[in-house]
């Protein structure tokens, strides 16, 4: 089972990297860009067929290691 | 005084830290992260600066699961004194021994320079040799030192005398190198036995090398 975890800074937490990239895009005349937020994607290959169980386990992984929940949120997508 | 410096893969300030504490008269032992034991006579554990585990995922995200860290957490929770410098401060945040989190510096690049700091509170062992309002000149060197904490928690930190140092200019006026909330450079826990700071006092030990302001900070632990 393939699991895709997306990690983002929480709403309201200023994203310095996103801001720098936004400035660079504006300098390249991509003036339609209103806002940029940068996160990270972690792809896990898990040996498990039970979707519910996998979701629960990956949630634990996010809480314990993959995300810092003081400043970050995460979302989990499971592909079969 | 017996100081134990924990060494992780990617730590690079352990020898400077050992030198600094030996200079003020402490005996220093380096302990590798795979050990889960601290010497019985340990008075202070130092988590030194560097790039533990290559800063992979997030600074200090992986080092918090090293065997030595579970022992350090127990040591701290039973009242033992712990000092985290730079990457060590990030470890204390990741393990939640101190509140808050570090983000990438506001201007996104790595900063390495001398930085002035203002003493905000000295009612603790670490800064007991200094006076409130003293200005120190101590090197900083970090890419993720942009301290973040929620608005309601920040007030509690000041009320409980947990904010010890703020970044400033040489006259003590506001200057914020990395975007930290309230220019915070150094914190302690509510019980005042766990200390974390981004600046490197162990790099300000010899006047001939630019500053010895770090000596007075570290000497606080001798009492």
Image: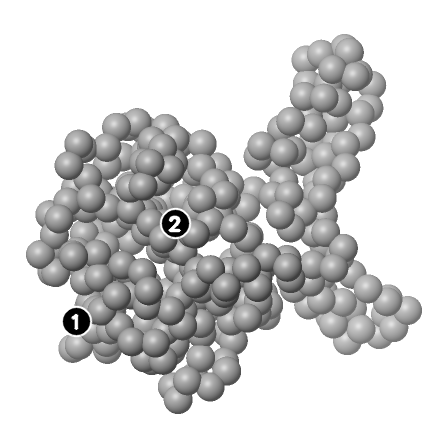
* Residue plotted at (49% across, 43% down): B96
Q: In this view, does A74 lie to the left or right of B178?
A: right
Q: Is residue B212 left or right of residue B53?
A: left
- Specify the label residue B95 is tagged with: none
Determine whether the residue tagged by mark 1 lies in a helix, strand or loop: loop
Residue B11 seen in render:
yes
Residue B95 image offset from top left, x and y in percent = 47, 40
Q: Mark 2 lies on which chain?
A: B
Q: Mark 2 points at which residue?
A: B191
Determine whether the residue tagged by mark 2 lies in a helix, strand or loop: loop
Q: Mark 1 lies on which chain?
A: B
| Residue furthest out toward the top | A49
Where residue B41 sits, quadrant-wise, is: top left
Q: Image height check: is B116 above or below A17?
A: below
Where residue A35 sits, quadrant-wise, is: bottom right
Where residue B222 sits, quadrant-wise, is: bottom left
Q: Is residue B23 left or right of residue A55?
A: left
- Specify the label residue B206 is tagged with: 1
Residue B131 image offset from top left, x and y in percent = 29, 76
* Residue plotted at (27% across, 35% down): B32
| Residue furthest out toward the right | A32
The verdict on a common chain for dots 2 and 1 is: yes
As measured in the structure, the alpha-carbon distance from the residue carrying label 2 to the one carrying label 1 is: 31 Å
Residue B137 image offset from top left, x and y in percent = 32, 77
First along the sequence among labels 2 and 1? 2
* Residue plotted at (16% across, 77% down): B208
Mark 2 touches mark 1? (CB < 8 Å) = no
Of A40 and B178, the residue lying toward us:
B178
Q: Image height check: is B68 above or below B23?
A: above
């Amino acid at each position: 089972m393939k699991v895709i975890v997306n990690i983002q800074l929480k709403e309201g937490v200023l994203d310095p990297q996103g801001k720098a990239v936004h400035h660079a895009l504006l300098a390249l005349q991509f003036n339609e860009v209103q806002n940029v937020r940068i996160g990270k994607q972690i792809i896990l290959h898990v040996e498990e067929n039970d979707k519910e169980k996998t979701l629960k386990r990956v949630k634990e992984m996010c809480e314990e290691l993959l995300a810092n929940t003081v400043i970050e949120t995460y979302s989990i997508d499971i592909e079969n | 005084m017996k100081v134990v410096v924990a060494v992780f893969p990617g730590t690079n300030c352990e020898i400077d830290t050992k030198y600094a504490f030996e200079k003020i008269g402490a005996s220093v032992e380096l302990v590798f992260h795979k050990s889960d034991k601290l010497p019985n006579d340990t008075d202070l554990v130092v988590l030194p600066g560097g790039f533990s585990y290559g800063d992979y995922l997030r600074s200090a995200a992986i080092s918090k699961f090293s065997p030595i860290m579970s022992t350090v957490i127990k040591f701290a929770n039973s009242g033992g004194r712990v000092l985290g410098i730079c990457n060590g401060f990030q470890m204390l945040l990741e393990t939640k021994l101190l509140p808050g989190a570090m983000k990438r510096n506001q201007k996104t690049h790595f900063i390495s320079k001398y930085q002035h700091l203002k003493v905000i509170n000295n009612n603790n062992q670490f800064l007991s040799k200094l006076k409130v309002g003293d200005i120190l000149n101590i090197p900083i060197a970090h890419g993720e030192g942009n301290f973040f904490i929620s608005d309601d928690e920040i007030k509690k930190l000041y009320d409980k005398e947990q904010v010890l140092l703020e970044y400033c200019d040489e006259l003590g006026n506001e200057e914020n190198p990395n975007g930290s909330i309230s220019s915070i450079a150094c914190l302690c826990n509510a019980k005042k036995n766990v200390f974390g700071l981004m600046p490197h006092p162990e790099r300000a030990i010899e006047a001939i090398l630019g500053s010895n302001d770090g000596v007075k900070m570290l000497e606080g632990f001798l009492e």
